Amino acid sequence: MSNAKRLFWLPRGYVIGAGFVGFAVIPLLLSQYYIFIANIALIHIVLAVGLNIVLGFTGQLVFANGVLFGVGAYATGLLMVDAHWPFWFAFPAGTAIATIIGVLVALPALRLRGLYLALATVAFAQFALWVFIHFDSLTHGVSGAVIPPLNFAPLPIIPPVGIYYLSFVLVIVAVYLAINLVRSRIGRAFVAIRESERAAEALAIDVPRYKLLAYFISAVYAGAAGGLFSAVVGAVVPDQFNLFQIVLQFCMVLVGGIGMIWGSVLGAIAIIGLQEMLRGLRELQEVGFGLLLLLTVLFLPGGFGAFLAKHVAGWRENLRNTSEDHAR
Amino acid sequence: MRKPLPFVLALSLCSAGFAPSVFAEEGITPTTIKIGTMVALTGPLSPLFIPQVNGTQIVFDEVNAAGGIHGRKIEYIREDDECLPARGVGAIKKLIYEVKPFIIVGGGCSNAAIAEKPEIIAAKIPWIITASTADGLTDPVSPYIFSSISPAWTEAYGILQLAIDDKKQRIAVVYQTDAWGKARIEPLREALKKKGIVPVAMEEVSPEPTDLTPTALKIQAANPDIVLMLLYPKAAVPFLRDSFKVGLKPTMVGVSPLLEIDQIAKGAGGPETVANFRVLGAAGYGPEDAQVAQWKAKVEKRFGDRFNLYHLQGIAGGQFAVEALRRAGPDPTREKILTAMSTLEAKADTYAGPFKCTPTDHQCQKTLGIFALKDGRITGVGQTTPSR
Amino acid sequence: MLLTYLLVSGITSGAMYALVAVGLVICYRTTGHLNFSHGEMYMVGGYFAFTFHVLWGVPYLPSLILAVVAGGVMGLLSDRLVFRRLIKAPPMAMVVATVALSFLLKGIARFLWGGQGEFVPFPSIVSGAPVQFLGVTIFPQQTVVLGVGLLAMVALTLLFRNTRAGKTMQATAESQRAAYLVGVRVERVYSATWAAAAALATLAAVLMAPLTQLTPDIGFSLLIKALAATVLGGLGNMPGAIVGGFVIGITEALAAAYIDSTAQDVSAFVVIMLVLVVKPTGLFGAKGQRDV
């Protein structure tokens, strides 16, 4: 138990509870504008958590998460637009496609580490963007594709509310699974790999297999987030999945806290909120998020999550289920 | 954590009474009319859209200064869509559900507009498109959407007509590989087929090229007597520059985004590079022409912008909107304005041709102006009204 | 005529990629880190030159020198504010930080110079008209670029390998502690390295500016090409990076004309991915690796 000074009392449970209730009632209280923004935030929670698993927990410096997000969005969207599948089939299929591509790409990447991995994934991200734009017989090219609105019959709700609650449920599932994953043996193996691949091998951890698992999980999350994204926005366009997108995702994970799931949740909400506040000030967005990411890396490498873990009760994220988590 | 369920249930019961109707007559009070717009206010394409919005703003300011429309002053609110669908949907939702305008006048980038269109139609808000030429927005016809700017196909058919009128036989085409380019190359292909013309060269370029000398050389090898340029400035400038360098100097014709011929000449290396260059665009007059001098003065005074042909488009759009609002009468409803627009005929100060809408054709403007650079000034040298 | 033009143009742009890549490699060999904002140093350097020469009317040669100096100062500042703190950090921190820095610089550049319009004109130092040389069409600016570029590269490689300063840099890379013990001011070496790399990038930008367009977004695509050159030659291998640069330049030019105009953008990415997957040490072998 650290002896760091407790700055204030704000148990994580209360914050999570308030957040849960807050998100749950947005469609009942606020206009479609807020529903949309909150929905985007929910999608990014899934993205950030998935990225954190491969980047924060397993320490793999990958820039490809934006690609898989895009693949999920395109796959789901194109299946709906061109193959006329209903969303309920297109979405799982789209997620599966993104996952398969994610794993296929991960296989050669397993041998790469650190700088080489970063380089290869940056190149891959740009390559994928190029494919989105130029393989236009499939992707509709630069003009993208418009997605027909969802049908939630027989429930008497309008599509934006329906997709919102669907996203909400998926976020709950995603975060729950992630928390349990990182507290399990698998999570600890991830962290061991992050700290030192050689030491992990010495501990009889099958490094390639666990790395692949981390890639797999982040691909599932990114693909699902992408599928939801295309349904919420109602269109897919290549420009949406460029390097700035990945910078935003990195912001969410690093500002929230590497290796902290709740940190990523907070990070995603904060960054999306910030981006919305900067609406109409796009130039400021580049400067702002660049600066935020830079300052976080320089001065707060553990992100706000680490800061909270040190100074506020109940925010530590342990790798085991300890009695601490059940005490209040 | 206490059980949240009862809390949530109670809250939902309370708010069940809330059902904010979007479809009531919003945006109108006895003294004001709220009009909204979402365009790329920031980002690389903003220099094309901000002047249009400013032009519309000037028209509304004039009307307000004269007492408004049937006694109501116009409040014009802009939101930024960053030319991205995700940001555009956020912008349009903010407009529709928080700002609640009576109508929307504006809208730009087609990337964002395609995602915004379903939202606008679902909310049944009349939308006058003043800046986006994407055919897909007004075709097929929607009862809620009208366009005051000439659509993309008119530019494609128009430049081909220009080539034919000029008796050019060897036509070369250079176009860019993006949504905007696609929206023009497809109708151009269609038009070429209809006229039975086979171009001597058809070259594709990327929208942000660094060096177009290979393209210029390839086109030069086909020996054309006219080159049709379906390009934005970022590609047109290197093309003109590199063509000039290799000695490719036939007549060159460009379309709307190239209306700022003086700037293009500057980037390409001087007025000699545009000696044979003409632009076909959605505007009636050059920015220095006498007919638009009063607007130029007003725009420069209010915004300090360098007056250009995008302002002209915005002014025309504003005048279209004002005329439609007038005809909707002293007790306007969205229904009334839609009815008024479906048969509207009017003339804008800055377009060479009239507006004409019919119930089956909401592309209300089809006359394009032809411009060239003479003595350093952008001058109108003709006009054309293409048909399909 | 087309093919020869393409080769000449490919060699010219290749020379620029090589020059930028050499800057990357010098930093990598000395500090062990890759600077993902190196492309933005190029872009900002170009805008400095634009400001001095076009906006303020300073004559060409003094503008060039001033711009290169300003670029060097940018490198020093980046070192002071950002790189110095992260030298000893794991690669992830430096990569993320330099990516963040690149967006920051891009945004600032857009704010300062974005309003210049979409195309920033930069007059050539020599006449723009093509000349015929041995039946090949060449633009004089290309020969200037090629000449200066080659000179710079040869000079740098020799400097790095044979002078005391260069050897000091190599020594610092091999072992910081040993360098300290011998009295090498390690921080100074690093600062000088970053400054030199930024100055090099600026030189490349100034040379290239009349031939291409200057916008706030060119930094990243140039970085990718320089990275492709470095990876192709073998990460950390200076002559390798130079050869890699020329290969990338020529491949691009040929691909653009003979495959598809859009293939120009993609060849660099494909090269990086293929090399890293098939033979990560590149054509000539990697050098100066940190223990990752």
Image: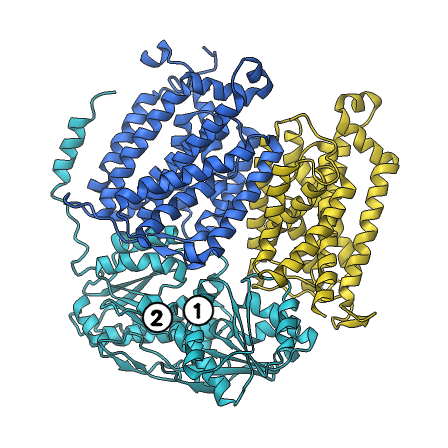
Query: Would you place residue A31 above or below residue C114 in this image?
Result: above
Which residue is at 12% across, 41% downward? B16
Image spot of residue A267 (x, y percent): 42, 33
Compare residues B339 and A308 and report the one nearer the observer.
Answer: B339
> How busy is the neighbourhood of tag 1: few (under 14 within 10 Å), some, or many (20 plus)?
few
Which chain is assigned yellow? C
Q: Quadrant of the C terminus of chain B?
A: bottom left
Q: CA distance from mark 1 to mark 2?
A: 10 Å
Label 1–label 2 contact, CB within 8 A: yes
State the SS at label 1.
Answer: helix
The verdict on a common chain for dots 1 and 2 is: yes
Q: According to the rendering, which colour does chain A have?
A: blue
Residue placed under numbered mark 2 in the picture: B61
Residue placed under numbered mark 1 in the picture: B302
**The quarter of the displayed image where residue C261 is located:** bottom right
Q: Which amino acid type is shown beneath numbered disc 2?
A: Asp
Horizontal arrangement in the rendering, residue A296 relative to residue A179 (left or right): right
Which residue is at 62% across, 62% downward? C258
State the SS at label 2.
Answer: helix
> Which tag, 1 or 2, sits closer to the chain's start?
2
Residue A83, visible in the rendered structure: yes
Horizontal arrangement in the rendering, residue A213 relative to residue C161 (left or right): left
Q: Which amino acid type is shown beneath numbered disc 1?
A: Arg
Q: Quadrant of the N terminus of chain B?
A: top left
The subunit carrying tag 1 is B
